[in-house]
Image (cartoon, rainbow, N blue to C red):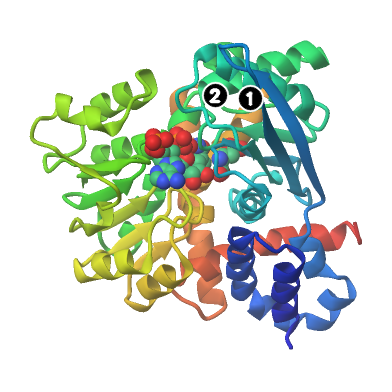
């Protein structure tokens, strides 16, 4: 059996009940098979793949907090410090009831290659908790965040591990966590990114993941002699990534006709009203059912459905495995040109394969959504030099990073004979730098 297949088997056997982690490992190892096969003897001797798929450290802890009625609750907190070959661990904190170790490991594993693709010196990590922020008061959110950070602060620091936002963790949560870190550790340092502008945050970090996604889509289309002008796009999600993806798509001339949340989806034939969406989701923290109050011509549907709408570009920006084989078939039947992932691993394995086999330009999340973490690294730079850059400066660096990233994955795919396969290109290009660093640093 090949070294790659042995390791995939081992990962499944040693980490049962972690299907998302298996999926992420399978995708990466399948893509880098060509590199591994060419170096099999050395890689086996160095246990290179074993070291790649086993996190350097996994931290799991109890998070007790008290609700507004005086009742105590206990959630589980996680931080997986996956790989520090190219820099301090970097990656978000997810707060969602579905969080478990396997989810955090899949996200941490993806983060290694994503962070490498940014070209910046950041290693891979991820964390979070099964805490559900929905319906909680501000005080309850603060209580949870403070308790979470009371434990997490022992393991992180501006030069060791720098968490940030993800699903359920936005500016409010980062603020409470930063305050608690500072209080306990006595350090005002860039230990988190996505901070408020008043205390060390970077302009354009809020917009960065969605904007970066569209900078990449724009470059992808241009490279194929096409453009976003006049295109119809469908977006899933209605959170941080989705909102700013919709905004930038509109600025670049596309019409975005859908968005969704965990209970339903909106079809707005005139184009999503971003100001309304921001008010509903960022200010009121309400459901998308409210959208119709702002846009009487729009439709609200319960359940899933954004992929059934005819479009040129599809941008899944909600969560993992939200675009299935049937959705891929529908998108292809409707003539979709490109599917680019704003979320992490939103497309199932069979759907990805179907899209690729049917000539759709498919760009995986670790490349397409790397603008968020790249801008987090720019926030770290600004914190280190104790300066703040203008919006234009950060935004233009972000754009350069995404344009370079696109060409980097495109070139890597071509170099190995997989032209147009951006999954292979992203995994190979991301892996090459990590491999160089791991080889240089010995067996650690
Ligand atoms: P948010 O919490 O801001 O928004 C998430 C959105 O997705 C919400 O609209 C939410 O619905 C919806 N959603 C979440 N879970 C589900 C689910 N199980 N089923 C259906 N809908 C769901 O998160 P972000 O926008 O930050 O993150 C979205 C994705 O992008 C995630 O995969 C994340 O890992 C990835 N990502 C985020 C980055 C960032 O900088 N924030 C960077 C790179 C990737 P509801 O409103 O009902 O909660
Ligand atoms: O998935 C991701 O890349 C993020 N949630 C952002 C991580 C970060 O450190 O900005």
Residue 138: horizontal and vertical position, in percent? 51, 14
Ligand number 2: quarter of image: top right
Q: Are marks 2 and 1 in contact (CB under 8 Å)?
A: yes
Quadrant of res 330: bottom left
Compared across the picture, whether 438 is left or right of 283 comes to right
Which of the numbered marks, if any, corresponds to residue 382?
A: 1
Q: Nearer the viewer, mark 2 or mark 1?
A: 2
Secondary-structure class at tag 1: helix
Q: Quadrant of the N terminus?
A: bottom right
Give the distance between the C-alpha atoms of the residues marked 2 and 1, in whole angstroms.
8 Å
Residue 123 higher or lower than 133, as above or below: below
Residue 421 higher or lower than 181, as above or below: below
Whether residue 399 is visible:
no
Crowding at dot 1, Cα within 10 Å, few <14 / some 14-19 / many 20+, comes out as: some
Task: Give the residue at the far left of this rendering.
Answer: 297
Residue 122: horizontal and vertical position, in percent? 69, 43
Residue 391 higher or lower than 315, as above or below: above
Quadrant of res 420: bottom left
Secondary-structure class at tag 2: loop
Which of the numbered marks, if any, corresponds to residue 202?
A: 2
User: Which residue sits at x=31%, y=58%?
Assistant: 222
Whether residue 322 is visible:
yes
User: Which residue sits at x=59%, y=34%?
Assistant: 376
- Choose the circle earlier in sequence order: 2 or 1: 2
């Amino acid at each position: 059996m090949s070294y790659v297949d042995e390791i995939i088997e081992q990962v499944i056997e040693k980490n049962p009940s972690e299907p998302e982690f298996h999926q992420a490992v399978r995708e990466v190892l399948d893509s880098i098979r060509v590199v591994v096969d060419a170096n099999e003897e050395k890689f086996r001797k160095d246990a290179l793949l074993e070291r790649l798929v086993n996190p350097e450290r996994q931290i799991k802890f109890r998070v007790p907090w008290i609700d507004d009625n005086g009742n105590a609750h206990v959630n589980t907190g996680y931080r997986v410090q996956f790989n520090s070959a190219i820099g301090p661990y970097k990656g978000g904190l997810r707060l969602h009831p579905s969080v478990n170790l396997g989810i955090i490991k899949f996200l941490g594993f993806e983060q290694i290659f994503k962070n490498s693709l940014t070209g910046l010196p950041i290693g891979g990590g991820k964390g979070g908790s099964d805490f559900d922020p929905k319906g909680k008061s501000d005080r309850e959110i603060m209580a949870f965040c403070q308790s979470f950070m009371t434990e997490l602060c022992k393991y992180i620091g501006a030069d060791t591990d720098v968490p940030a936002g993800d699903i359920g963790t936005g500016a409010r949560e980062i603020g409470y966590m930063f305050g608690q870190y500072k209080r306990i550790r006595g350090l005002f340092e860039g230990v988190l990114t996505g901070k408020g502008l008043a205390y060390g945050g970077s302009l354009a970090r809020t917009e960065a993941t969605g904007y970066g996604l569209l900078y990449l889509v724009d470059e992808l289309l241009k490279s194929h002699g096409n453009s976003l002008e006049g295109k119809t796009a469908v977006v899933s999600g209605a959170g941080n990534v989705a909102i700013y993806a919709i905004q930038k798509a509109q600025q670049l001339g596309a019409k975005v006709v859908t968005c969704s949340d965990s209970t339903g989806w909106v079809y707005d034939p005139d184009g999503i009203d971003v100001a309304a969406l921001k008010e509903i989701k960022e200010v009121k923290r309400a459901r998308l059912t409210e959208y119709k109050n702002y846009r009487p011509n729009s439709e609200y549907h319960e359940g899933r459905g954004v992929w059934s709408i005819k479009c040129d570009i599809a941008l899944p920006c909600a969560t993992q495995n939200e675009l299935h084989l049937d959705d891929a078939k529908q998108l292809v039947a409707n003539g979709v040109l490109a599917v680019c992932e704003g979320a992490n691993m939103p497309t199932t394995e069979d759907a990805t394969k179907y899209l690729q086999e049917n000539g759709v330009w498919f760009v995986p999340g670790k490349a397409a959504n790397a603008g968020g973490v790249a801008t987090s690294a720019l926030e770290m730079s600004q914190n280190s030099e104790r300066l703040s850059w203008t919006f234009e400066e950060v935004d233009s660096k972000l754009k350069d990073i995404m344009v370079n990233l696109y060409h980097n994955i495109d070139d890597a795919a071509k170099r190995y004979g997989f032209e147009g396969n951006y999954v292979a290109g992203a995994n190979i290009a991301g892996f090459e730098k990590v491999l160089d660093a791991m080889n240089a640093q010995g067996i650690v």
